[in-house]
Image: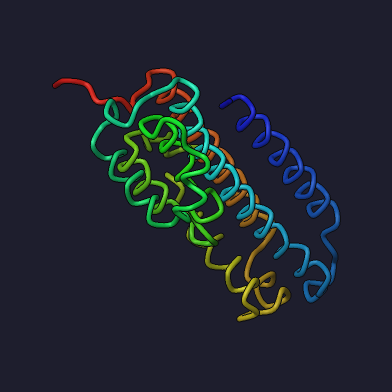
Amino acid sequence: MMIDVKNTFSQRKAEIDEYFNFLNAYQPANADDNLFKILKSNLLIMLYNLIESSISNAIEEIHNNMYSNSVSFNSLKGEIKSIIISNTKKVNPDKLVLQINDIATDIVKHTFKKDELFSGNVDGKKIREISVKYGFNSDTDYNKTKHGSHLVTIKDKRNDLAHGIFSFTEVGKEYTIQDLEEMKDKTLNYISEILDNIECYLLGQDYLYRQP
C-alpha cells in the first residue's frame, strides 16, 4: 500500500533530520576536522539511499496496485504494456511459469524486479523519465524542491564514495553545513511531492488505457 511507502519515507526522513541536527550541533572550530568531513559525506549517502529506496518502493507499489486490483495486461495503457514486456526479458522463464496462474494479471507483478530498477543511478532526470513511461505527474513546487536538481549531485557523490574514487574527507570538505541543509531540505521535499503524485496516480488508476 502507498501508505506504507510514505510511512517508510517519513521514518527515513526523520533519521536524516536527526543526523543533520547532530552535524549542526557538532560543527568544530577547526575547519580541517576530518571527522566532520566524513560525517558530512555520510549525509549524502543517507540522502541517496532514501531517494532510491523511496522511488523503488513507489514503482513497486504501482505494480502491486495493478495486481491487487486484478488489472489485466490488455486493459493497460500502451506505455506500461511496453514496460512489462521489457521486464520479461530479465526474468527466468522457468521461475515465471511457476509463479503464473493467469498470465493476463500475474505478469503485471511477477516480471517486476525492484532491485534492478536503478542500481545507483537515480536522479531527477531518471525520475522524470520514469514518470513519462508510467504516466504519473513529475511536477513539483520549484521553490520547495528545485525540481530535484540536487539529486544528480547526491547521486554522483554517493557513487564516488561507493566506488572509492574520492575519500569521505575529500567529498565532505566540498560542502558547508548550509550547503547540506539546502540539499537535504529541497531533496526531501522533492521526494515527498513525487510520492504524493504517485499516490494520486494510483487513486485514479491512471495506468489504465482510456479511450481519448
The answer to whether 152 appears left or right of 170 in the picture is left
Say whether residue 99 is visible. yes
Give percent across and percent down for residue 70. 43, 22
Q: Nearer the viewer, residue 73 or 128?
A: 73
Query: What is the quadrant of the C terminus in the image?
Result: top left
Q: Residue furthest bottom?
A: 165
Q: Nearer the viewer, residue 128 or 85?
A: 85
Give percent across and percent down for residue 11. 73, 36
Give percent across and percent down for residue 91. 46, 54
Give percent across and percent down for residue 57. 56, 40
Here the colouring is rainbow
Q: Nearer the viewer, residue 167 or 133?
A: 133
Q: Nearer the viewer, residue 190 or 8?
A: 8
Tell me what residue is drawn at x 69 percent, y 78 percent.
167
Tell me what residue is drawn at x 69 percent, y 69 percent.
172
Q: In which image quadrant can residue 46 be found? A: bottom right
Q: In which image quadrant can residue 146 be found? A: top left
Tell me what residue is drawn at x 79 percent, y 52 percent.
24
Q: Is residue 95 above or below residue 110?
A: below
Say whether residue 123 is visible. no
Query: What is the quadrant of the N terminus in the image?
Result: top right
Tell me what residue is drawn at x 37 percent, y 46 percent.
130
How many marks the image carries: the answer is 0
